Image: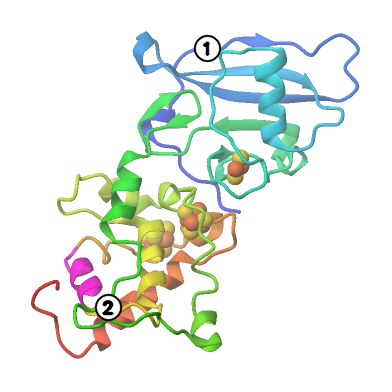
Amino acid sequence: MAQLTLPKNSVVQKKGKSFGAPAGAEKTVTFKVYRYDPSGGENPRLDTYEIDAAGVSMVLDGLIKIKNEVDPTLSFRRSCREGVCGSCAMNIDGANTLACTKGMDECAGGEVVVYPLPAQPVIRDLITDLSNFYRQQAFIEPYLQADATHTPKEFIQSPEDRQKLDGLYECILCACCSTSCPSYWWNGNKNGEEEYLGPAALLQSYRWLSDSRDEKSNERLDMLEDEFKLYRCHTIGNCTQVCPKGLNPAKAIAEIKKLMVNRPAKATAKG
Ligand code: SF4
Ligand code: SF4
Ligand code: FES
């Protein structure tokens, strides 16, 4: 997998602390973990922890072991431990992924190097502020919308049309894709002005554009039609490479561009 360039707030300028392996450790694994408290006035640092990894296989389990047994000040998000909630997304061994599904033995050189998701403001250690990411999810209106004239009791969908949502609905909003996208680093945080929405929001947008029950396709395309929101994707492909659910945001973006070209006429106003 391609290694990603780390962002400015991941540049470590201070020598970190080191914690040695416990006496009698059966299987020593070294973690190097980004530490930063923006309120503390000190530069970020990389702390080194040698842990006894006997019986521990996933990176998240290693981080929990560090927090429980070595350094309770280490901060990170986690919830499901099953690759479902998306909260443990971080940059491990140079690529964004979920800590709970990444094996320690998959990391190069026998070391587990952990940084926060790139190019997002760091709240503390491995916890980033994803408010901008969620604002962009809200912007694409991720819910079924009917035409104002449509008053059905239910929206019928054929099995064939339902299948068109496969590969789209499974997104867990972990932000691994958007925060690995160089175009998103440069254009993704402009508070709505001349802003690239990024692969996660655009994959969600395509999920609703693909839904046979949704009747606002033209309006959804109108919302994306400027120089930035959609067209700042340059098909670099980092997004698809890192998605821990095996989804293909780059393809979804290409499909939206095709819809944009092929639609009959631009809608005038959102109904
Ligand atoms: S394909 Fe588009 S969205 Fe994906 S990483 Fe490249 S520029 Fe970003
Ligand atoms: S498309 Fe994949 S990487 Fe992007 S937010 Fe969804 S699950 Fe995460
Ligand atoms: S803890 Fe939920 S995806 Fe990792």
Q: Is residue 93 visible?
A: no
User: Percent position (x, y) of residue 211?
Assistant: 40, 78
Crowd around label 1: few <14 · some 14–19 · many ≥20 (10 Å) = few
Q: Looking at the rendering, which quadrant does residue 88 occupy?
A: top right
Describe the element under mark 1 as helix, strand or loop.
loop
User: Percent position (x, y) of residue 27?
Assistant: 87, 25
Q: Is residue 5 left or right of residue 205?
A: right
- The quadrant of the picture occupied by the C terminus is bottom left
The amino acid marked with disc number 2 is: Ser
Q: Nearer the viewer, residue 147 or 211?
A: 147
User: Percent position (x, y) of residue 52?
Assistant: 82, 21
Q: State the residue at coordinates (40%, 36%).
A: 7
Q: State the residue at coordinates (61%, 13%).
A: 72
Q: State the residue at coordinates (37%, 51%).
A: 182
Q: Nearer the viewer, residue 198 or 87?
A: 87
Name the magenta segment's main secondary structure.
Answer: helix
Q: Which mark is in front, 1 or 2? A: 2
User: Percent position (x, y) of residue 164?
Assistant: 50, 80
Magenta stretch: give its range.
Answer: 219-227
For mark 2, what is the residue? 217
**For residue 216, above or below residue 40:** below
The label on residue 15 is 1
